[in-house]
Image (spheres, rainbow, N blue to C red):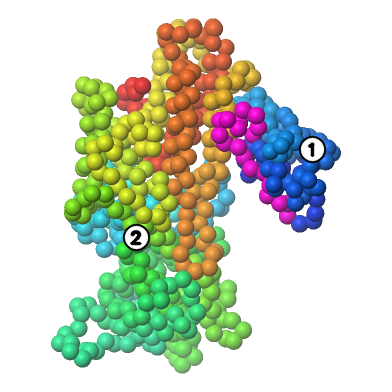
Amino acid sequence: METGGGRFGVSETLGALNAALKKKPGPPASVWFKESSARNLRSRDFLAPQAALRPLFPGGQVPKDIIEDVISLKCPGVPPLQSCQQTPLGLTVQLQRPAAFQQVLNSIAEFTKPFQSAGGQSIILNCTPLWSWRSLDMLSLSNLRAILVTDHLAEVLRIQGLNVHLVPAVPDEGIQKFLHQLRVDWPSELETTFIPEDVLALKQVLSQCPYATVPGLEPGQTRLADDVIFKVHLKNFLAQQSLEGYDPNLDVCLVTEEKLRVLAQLRQMALRCAGTGPGGCCRVVHVVSCEGEFQQQQVDLLWRMLDLGAHTALQEELMVKGDRISLKTFLFLLCSLPLPFWSSTTDEKGSVPASEDLDAKKHLVCGPVKVANSPSPVGAPQYFQLRRCQMYEASVMKYGDLVQDNSWTEIISVLTSAAMRFEMLSTAHQSQIFLNLEDSSISTKGTKSGAFVMYNCARLATLFKTYQQAVEQGAYPAFPPASELNFSLLREEGEWLLLFNYILPFPETLSQAAQLPLSSKGIRITASTEAVCKFLIHLSMDFSSYYNRVHILGVSRDPPGKQPALPARQQQLLLSLSSCRLQCPTGHAPPWEANGTAVH
């Protein structure tokens, strides 16, 4: 087989192990899984349970020649194997841990670099609550959750190599200031030029749409609703197009100037992105709070209807007027078509297809946010101020007068943002969140809080700053090249736990967080927006446990000459720090590194 090499990966290893047990043609069965608990990792790294082996081998007993093939397995992305044994639990595999340490810790940059497989593709993230957000007081906690989910998705998608475009633009300075406090970098200007004539052209398309009518007064009405220009019968359109996943209660949509302005801007952005992306493809994901899902489905159907209407209108104009069609009308109708029409404009019956793949518009719905024991609704600004005050008080209890220093203003702000992000992002986006806003709910020590993760990141930064100062003072030797380190000295179980559970899976964690099932049926999709937060929480817990046992760089302990494992351990922690910083959901490196504040 091929010689192992390159960046080790958990999925590559599992795939190779499954293939080694393959007996029949076709894809191999998935029988192996990676161990993660400290207790199990003392004796094995991967396990194929006995129950999974029985369908493949009589009595679940794996032949010796296959076991030998597993031991000698050498494939790209697979670490060297130490042993493969048949046990009462099943088939177990343990890696050559010193070799794995050496390969990984000698190539820090390689193992902290995320996968980039998107190839410059473009995606639009439409944060729908921002379209109707006119003041801070109107921002609900559910809307805030949608904004933070959108911002988080944009970051992990960019890391994977996608061109991400955020809409709508937020020009209001007060709103921008609030988003900046949350470490949300949101555009203040449109990437495309909005042309009012586009709305007029959309009106022209709707005026010829069989599902749209000019509204008249209903019995008992004395006046029409403000700004209503069309009444669109969505139920008839849904039935004819056989679209799946929409609310069955969708019926009549009252189209206003505002709805058409939103659609015009979205369509302009989609056209721009499709023109710059590979293959002329641009996907759209509407991130919507559960309260606004019904209204967004109306807008989505209206968009689909206008796409089909523009195509039909172009055909009719060309058939009726021929070369007498105006250039302005021709260009607008032509540019209004979604890009997939160029590759397949009709099915075998000559009608426009309504396939989900044609427009690739999906809805990512965020569940509600409830506040426990609150007599009145809590808005996003009130939530931020409350958490900021609580974080300040918790920091005073931990660090005393140090918190009065001006440098702590930024630290408190980062901790507050991290705490809020973890509260909003550590739960699956489609699930409901219950917030406890009491003083006891926020802490610098709670192992599930954003502050706890940030303090551990700061602790790592402080460790290396302290070490560098000790080197300059002659208390410690200079850090040797990684190629000279003896990684066989890393025998503490916490060291293997950090490498095997966090450093190795690091790129795959980011990849998992960026996976969007855009080709799935229906309009709803889900994403693992909670994956990064959970990863960081568990990393921080295991690092804290390891550090409290080992106390690297403890001044009162053995001198460096009697700590042979010290340089290797430092290299291990440096990689953990890189992982922590790259995945930090505040979107910024912790400020401790910049201002020199020591956090222990």
Q: What range of the chain is rendered magenta?
A: 27-45
Position of residue 296 relative to residue 435, above or below, is below
Earlier sequence position, callout 1 versus callout 2: 1
Residue at 60% over, 20% down: 491
Residue 280, position as x, y percentages in the image = 53, 64
Residue at 45% over, 15% down: 553
Comparing 141 with 591, the one in front is: 141
Comparing 344 with 184, the one in front is: 184
Position of residue 520 relative to residue 576, above or below, is below
The residue under label 1 is which amino acid type? Ile
Residue identified by numbered label 1: 67
Within the magenta stretch, is there residue 209?
no
Q: Are marks 1 and 2 in contact (CB under 8 Å)?
A: no
Residue 242, position as x, y percentages in the image = 50, 79
Q: CA distance from mark 1 to mark 2?
A: 52 Å
Residue at 18% over, 87% down: 221
Give the main secondary structure of the magenta stretch. loop
